[in-house]
C-alpha cells in the first residue's frame, strides 16, 4: 500500500492512453433552431472533455500523479484551445502537441435533459506514438494499461491490437474501455472488438456496450439473463475479466476468481458526464494500491457516484473513496 508521497518501486504503474479534448456546453436550446437563425442561451461552460481527460483529472484527485506512479499519454492541437487544455490538465496529464486543431465538442442542452453534440475530431487522429512506444518499452510486469477513447481515435483503433499484444508480452495487465462506437455495433465493429478481446485482460464496458459487442438483445433489465449471456460471450471471446458499469446500479465483476457486485450509493445526480471515466480511475487506483479487482469495485463506484453528484464538478480523493469502501 502506498500512502501519498513518492510511489514505492514495487507498486504497479498506471499507463493511460486515450483522448482529451475541449467540451463546450450551452443551453438550454428550445425549440430546435431553424437553419439560418441565431439562438441566445443563458448557460455556457467550457471544460475538459474526452475519456482520458476525465480519467486524468480523477486520477490526479486520487493521488495518482503523471510522471510518478503513472504515465498519462494523450495529444493536443497546436492552437489556443490546445493551450487552454494543457493548462487545465497540468499536473494531471501531459499532452503532446501535434500539428492540428484541437478536438472540440459543442453540447447543446435541452430543457427535457437531452443533449445534442456536435464534434470536430481535430487532433484525435494524431497518436503520440513515440511516447507510447517508450512507455511500453519501460513497462514492468504487473503495470496497468488503460486504453480509452478507442472509437474516437482512428490511429489507436488501427494500432490497438499490436500495442495491447506488446503490452501483454511484457506482462502488463491490459484494460480497455472502448466507449460506444459512433457507427453503432455493426457486424464489422463487433468482429473488430471481439478480435481485440484476447489481448484484453480486463474489459470495461458499460451494460449497453457489453450487450452491443456480444450481439445480445437488450431486455431492459440490469441483472437479466441478457447480461449473463453477454458475459459468457465476451469471456469466451478471450476477455479474462470483465467489469460492467451499471449506472445507478453500480458495477459487476466477472472473472476467473468469481463474481463481485458493488451497489452505487443513492446520490442526487448533477451531471453524469465522465461517470465511466471516473469509475475507471477509481478501479485502477485501487488495484495499484494492492486491492483485488473485486475489491476495487468499491472505490471505483464510489468515486464515480461522488463526482457525478458534485456541481461544480469535483473528483474525490483516495481517503474519501477508501473510507467509504471500508464501511
Ligand atoms: N444515477 C446514478 N446514481 C449513482 N451513481 C451513478 C449513477 N449513474 C452512474 N453512477 C456511477 O457511475 C458509475 C459508472 O456508470 P455508468 O454505467 O454510467 O458508466 P458509463 O455509461 O460508462 O459512463 P460514461 O457515460 O461516462 O461512459 C457507476 O458504477 C456508478 O458508480
Ligand atoms: Mg463509458
Image: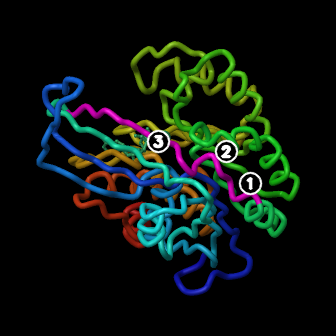
Q: Residue at x 29, y 60 (%)?
A: 313
Q: Residue at x 31, y 41 (%)?
A: 107
* Highlighted magenta segment, given as a residue range: 113-129
Query: 17 above or below 84?
Result: above
Q: Which residue is mark 2?
A: 202
Identify the mark nearer the N-term, 1 or 3: 3
Task: List x then y, in percent, for residue 39.
Answer: 15, 37
Q: Are marks 2 and 1 in contact (CB under 8 Å)?
A: yes
Q: Pointer 2: residues within 10 angstroms few (<14), some, or many (20+)?
A: many
Q: Is mark 2 within 8 Å of ligand 2?
A: no
Q: Residue furthest right?
A: 169
Q: Which residue is mark 3?
A: 120
Q: Splitting the image into 4 quarters, where does residue 61 fall?
A: bottom left
**Residue 318 appearing in the image:** no
Q: Pointer 3: residues within 10 angstroms few (<14), some, or many (20+)?
A: few
Is 146 covered by the magenta stretch? no
Labelled disc at residue 173 = 1
Along the line of sight, which residue is nearer the eye, 269 or 91? Answer: 91
Front disc: 1 or 3: 3
CA separation in Å, label 3 and label 2: 30 Å
Q: Residue furthest front?
A: 36
CA separation in Å, label 1 and label 3: 32 Å
Identify the mark nearer the N-term, 3 or 2: 3
Task: List x then y, in percent, for residue 120.
Answer: 47, 42
Quarter of the image where ligand 1 sits: top left
Front disc: 3 or 2: 3
Q: Splitting the image into 4 quarters, where does residue 237 fall?
A: top right
CA separation in Å, label 2 and label 1: 8 Å
Circle 2 SS class: strand
Q: Residue at x 58, y 66 (%)?
A: 95
Is 123 covered by the magenta stretch? yes
Amino acid at each position: 500500500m502506498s500512502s501519498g508521497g513518492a510511489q514505492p518501486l514495487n507498486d504497479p504503474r498506471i499507463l493511460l492512453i486515450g483522448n482529451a479534448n475541449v467540451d463546450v456546453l450551452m443551453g438550454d436550446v428550445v425549440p430546435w433552431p431553424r437553419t439560418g437563425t441565431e439562438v441566445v442561451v443563458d448557460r455556457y461552460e467550457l471544460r475538459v472533455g474526452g475519456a482520458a481527460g476525465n480519467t486524468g483529472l480523477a486520477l490526479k484527485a486520487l493521488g495518482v500523479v503523471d510522471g510518478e506512479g503513472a504515465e498519462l499519454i494523450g495529444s493536443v492541437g497546436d492552437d489556443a484551445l490546445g493551450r487552454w487544455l494543457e493548462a487545465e490538465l497540468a499536473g494531471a496529464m501531459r499532452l503532446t502537441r501535434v500539428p492540428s486543431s484541437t478536438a472540440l465538442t459543442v453540447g447543446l442542452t435541452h430543457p427535457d435533459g437531452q443533449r445534442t453534440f456536435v464534434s470536430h475530431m481535430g487532433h484525435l487522429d494524431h497518436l503520440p506514438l513515440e511516447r507510447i512506444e517508450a512507455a511500453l518499452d519501460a513497462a514492468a510486469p504487473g503495470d496497468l494499461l488503460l486504453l480509452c477513447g478507442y472509437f474516437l481515435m482512428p490511429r489507436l483503433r488501427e494500432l490497438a491490437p499490436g500495442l495491447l499484444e506488446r503490452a501483454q508480452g511484457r506482462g502488463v495487465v491490459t484494460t480497455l474501455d472502448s466507449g460506444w462506437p459512433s457507427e453503432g455495433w455493426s457486424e464489422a465493429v463487433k468482429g473488430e472488438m471481439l478480435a481485440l478481446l484476447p489481448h484484453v485482460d480486463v474489459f470495461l464496458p458499460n451494460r449497453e456496450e457489453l450487450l452491443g459487442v456480444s450481439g445480445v438483445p437488450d431486455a431492459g433489465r440490469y441483472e437479466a439473463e441478457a447480461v449473463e449471456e453477454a458475459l459468457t460471450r465476451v469471456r469466451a471471446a478471450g476477455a479474462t475479466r470483465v467489469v460492467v458499469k451499471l449506472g445507478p446500479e453500480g458495477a459487476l465483476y466477472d472473472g476467473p476468481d468469481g463474481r463481485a457486485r458493488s451497489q452505487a450509493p443513492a446520490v442526487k445526480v448533477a451531471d453524469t458526464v465522465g461517470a465511466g471515466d471516473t469509475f475507471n480511475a477509481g478501479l485502477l487506483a485501487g488495484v495499484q494500491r494492492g486491492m483485488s479487482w473485486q475489491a476495487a469495485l468499491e472505490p471505483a463506484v464510489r468515486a464515480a457516484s461522488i463526482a457525478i453528484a458534485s456541481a461544480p464538478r469535483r473528483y474525490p480523493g483516495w481517503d474519501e473513496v477508501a473510507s467509504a469502501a471500508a464501511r
